[in-house]
Amino acid sequence: MNVTLRETRIDTPGRQHMGFVDCDVHPFFRTPADFDPFLSARWREHRVTIGNRARQPLHKGTLYPRMSPGNGMRMDAWPTGGGPPGSDLKMMQEQLLDLYDVRYGMLAPLVGGAAAERNLEFAAAMATAVNEWQCAVFCDPDPRLKASVQITIEDEDAALAEIERRAGDGRFAQVNIPPRGLEPLGRRRYRKILAACAANGLPISLHLGGTSGHASTGGGWPSFYHEEHPSYVQTMQTLVTSLVCEGVFDELPDLKVVMVEGGFAWWPALAWRLDKHWKRLRTEAPLAMAPSEYMRRHFWVTTQPMEEPERAEDMLQTIEWIGPDRVMFSTDYPHWDQDDPRYAFKVKLPDDWAPLIYRENALALYRLD
Amino acid sequence: MASRHVVAAADEIPPGGRKIVTVRGRQIGVFNIGGEFFALINVCPHQGAKLCEGAIVSQLVSPAPGEYGLARQGEMLRCPWHCWEFDIRTGQSWCEPDDFKARTFNVTVEAGGTLAKGPFKAETVAVSVERNYVVVEM
Amino acid sequence: MTATEATAIAVSTVGAIDCDIHPAVPGARALLPYMDEYWREHMLRRGLERDSFELMAFPPNAPINVRPDWKLAKGPAGSSLAEMRAHVLEPMGTRLAICNVLYGAQAMMSEDLSAALCRGVNNWLAAEWLDADPRLRASILVPQHSGELAAEEIERMAGDRRFVQVLMLANAELPAGRRQMWPIYRAAEKHGLPIGLHAGSTFRHPLSASGWGSTLLEDYVSYAQGMAGALNSLLAEGVFQKFPELRVVLIESGVTWLPASIWRMNKTWRGVRSEVPWLNRLPGDIIRERVRLTAQPMDAMDGGEGLARMLDQLGSDEMLLFASDYPHWHYDGSDPVPAGIPPEMLRKMMIDNPLATYPRLQQA
């Protein structure tokens, strides 16, 4: 097979990416007090005295510490004026938005703790605060950045209220839902929230991370970050399985789902597995079409962290099986395992795929232009 | 054609230290390991990060699970992005799979260059010390 | 539900080694003669001999777990040797078949009860199956929640060389590679026995970090992700370094999830290996050397389109092991060889790879 390999002499980058839509950008606070302007006095005090309470042993930080300071940041993204990577819009512009002429950046704020918070009232307050903060600090000063609606997935009333509040606000492009909730997302308890997202034309974005208290793997808690990192891939697949097999898309044909930072090379085998076993268990899970068909219609994946095949050209086969219209480029700036748009693809993308993956798929999904 | 460039006074880069300089339009990192000088092109062969700005670390020695040891302290460079580790002396990646099986296939190369040998080596630059100056040859 | 027509087997399986066949315990009563007097009385005292100990992970009447023409008039599918002969051993012309018993013995909370039931199963297997048909071999069922007791059972059974593997469910209380499990691997390695990790779970945990799904279908699909987690654990914990002779067989995993998992593991390793510095080789290379997979179910499109390409991504033709997976229903028709397997791989899959993986098969 005649394949054009990327020039491996690294100082001659590809050009296909310029003007791309970055489907995963992480804003951070300089200090947690940054949320105070958006919180009532009660919650300002609560934040300082009680703080976030998730289902994990450490009050702050993670059970699986990352390999780089700052909980897994690229080492050259620390602003000289202080604050963690991602907290300085100017640096984000220099290192990402202006550098690559980024068309739009989809924000995924993994801050505030609303997703995993056990005190649901505090969670709702933080979700609202983070939504306001995204706009004030990032999206209003730089409209290339699009916010994600933070909601409290375990509190239906508050979630619906927050979606209502942001629907129609063009600064918000999607709704962030934590992939590790108390139950898989296809379960009935979450249906109304999903319906509200679909009804308002807001894709849901499942960004990996966090814990709701269940072990990271079906076999229990791993010891190492080396295992935790790929365990997110397992979680993503469970969500696809749950949403498809519970018939969510028969009920909500307008629901769109973006899986962020979960990689994507797992997609073809999961599609084959779902189809094969669904045939045998159709009576248990009646669906209007094959599972792989739902995947093709309702799911998108972002590219980072891009899997690295041992033979670079195998990536093309994988994307072909998924469908190049489902794949959207992301950097994950400023995390340590971010993908650089110049070099992330080790094989040259076909000319008709590159515009889709770098721009067109995201522009269409998020209705950006 | 290679030419020689003075990049620093020898005592400007103490043992364990480094200096990033630009020579002939390319950034290089010059390192002092125990009085010897080494230089690497400041581009990670993985995804182009500024490799020479990464942390200087030790080689890890672990004969069995749960056993932890250090060797060659201060001789490894850790890329600031994906944390790949490179031997400062040779540029060799510590993650070079030694029995990596390359498949053969016909390859065409994008205009502008030749295929470098393997993706896992940082590019080294020849360094010498002459009369108290650190000189690189590029 | 259509009855499966007996079609001629497209690819000859005569002389093949079937690496995954499931005799079923007809009921706990059948185990009583094979337990010591203490546990016999204990079972009767508590009425446990009336229990089925069926695994939640494998409800015996679910369509996926029993091909219609393999159902029995009496007793769970797979519980009759005579029927097993008629259903698979004779038609396929199998030379050898490895019996893997799926049973709740491994799931019991009491480690001691778990061990007693496993002992009973292993004794029953030897007496009523292995003694009765010279083609049959077996895996040692172990109380996998106790490393110590599992190692004892391995020591007890290893002398019977018809036992060729140690059987565990892929998902239990702790990830497969954890140090608490190492007594099991030590004993297995000592006796030249591969570890067979079978798809499924003792459900100490939900199958994913997102909690408990609703249907068997969701669970079943998730077993493949469970396998990935188990394999990642074995690698990260350094099991393959600590036990340099140990082999692991992933049974009923689905197979096609593995290439993408290798790509991800290799990538993670390059950046994160300083956390696990004993992991000093590319995970993909270790997997190719030490891990094998049974070929049913084979998660592929009908007709096998794309399968050859996907298998090629594994980078080895030594990893697949032929299996009927009797009496589970993973293929239409009678041909247990998945469509789309490259012809040059067939003989390796059916004979060479099993012989290389299970050294004890080479003896009479």
Image: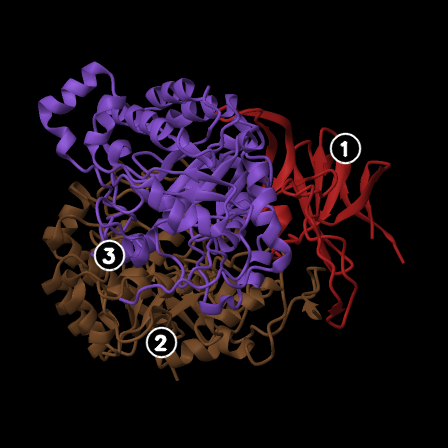
C170 relative to C349, above or below: above
10 Å crowding of disc 1: few (<14), some (14-19), many (20+):
few
Residue A139 is left or right of residue A39, and the answer is right
Chain under numbered label 1: B
The image quadrant where one finds the N terminus of chain C is bottom left
User: Tags 1 and 2 in contact by the CB under 8 Å rule?
Assistant: no
Chain under numbered label 3: A
Image point 81% across, 42% down: which residue?
B127
10 Å crowding of disc 3: few (<14), some (14-19), many (20+):
many
Residue C358 is left or right of residue A71, and the answer is right
Q: Which residue is mark 3?
A: A184
A263 relative to C39, above or below: below
Residue A297's disc number: 2
Element carrying mark 3: loop
Residue B131 is left or right of residue A348, and the answer is right
Tag 2: residue type? Arg
Q: Earlier in the sequence, mark 2 or mark 3?
A: 3
Q: CA distance from mark 1 to mark 2?
A: 60 Å
Specify the chain shown as purple.
C
Specify the chain shown as brown.
A
